[in-house]
Amino acid sequence: MQNKYHSEIAAAVHEDMRDMFKLGVVDKQTMRTFDELCLVPVQPMTAEEIRTLREREGLSQPVLAWYLNVSKNLISDWERGVRKPGGAALKLLNLVKTKGVQAISL
């Protein structure tokens, strides 16, 4: 998956810092700071967006839950707005939104 940057300059700086991190010149804490400054964060999704995404991909709640490795009840909670996805699940949902479910299928 390709990173999204705030600008071309941010991309260049981040790539240079990543190379320095790999060489051991930059520590993990500094690299995290550059990640926060340069990378565009994952976009939150509304309950309606999640339901629309699932329907666009032709998936039932249990099947989407299987792809995301979460419970069917959690998918239902997201779609009803009871809970909001976060972390890895939100990242995977955004990946499905941009590239389709095949991007996360085995």
Image (cartoon, helix red, strand yellow):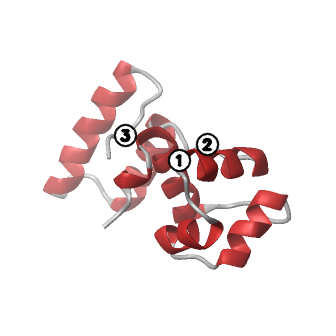
Q: Which residue is mark 1?
A: 94
Name the residue at 33% across, 29% down: 11
Q: Is residue 84 above or below residue 34?
A: below
Is 27 positioned to the left or the right of 55 in the image? left
The residue closer to the viewer here, 13 or 56, is 56
Q: Which residue is mark 3?
A: 3
Q: Is residue 70 above or below residue 12?
A: below
Amino acid bearing label 1: Asn
- Under circle 3, the secondary element is loop
| Residue 84 image offset from top left, x and y in percent | 74, 60
The residue closer to the viewer here, 73 or 55, is 55
Whether label 1 touches label 2, CB < 8 Å: yes
Label 1: how many Cα within 10 Å (few below 14, some 14–19, many 20+): some
Please tell me the numbered disc located at residue 5.
Answer: none
| Residue 58 image offset from top left, x and y in percent | 55, 53
Would you identify the image quadrant in which residue 15 lies?
Answer: top left
Whether label 3 touches label 2, CB < 8 Å: no
Amino acid bearing label 3: Asn
Mark 1 or 3 closer to N-term?
3
Q: Which residue is mark 2?
A: 43
Name the residue at 67% across, 45% down: 52
Whether label 1 touches label 3, CB < 8 Å: no
Name the residue at 37% across, 40% down: 3
Amino acid bearing label 2: Gln
Name the residue at 36% across, 53% down: 102
- Tally of numbered tags: 3
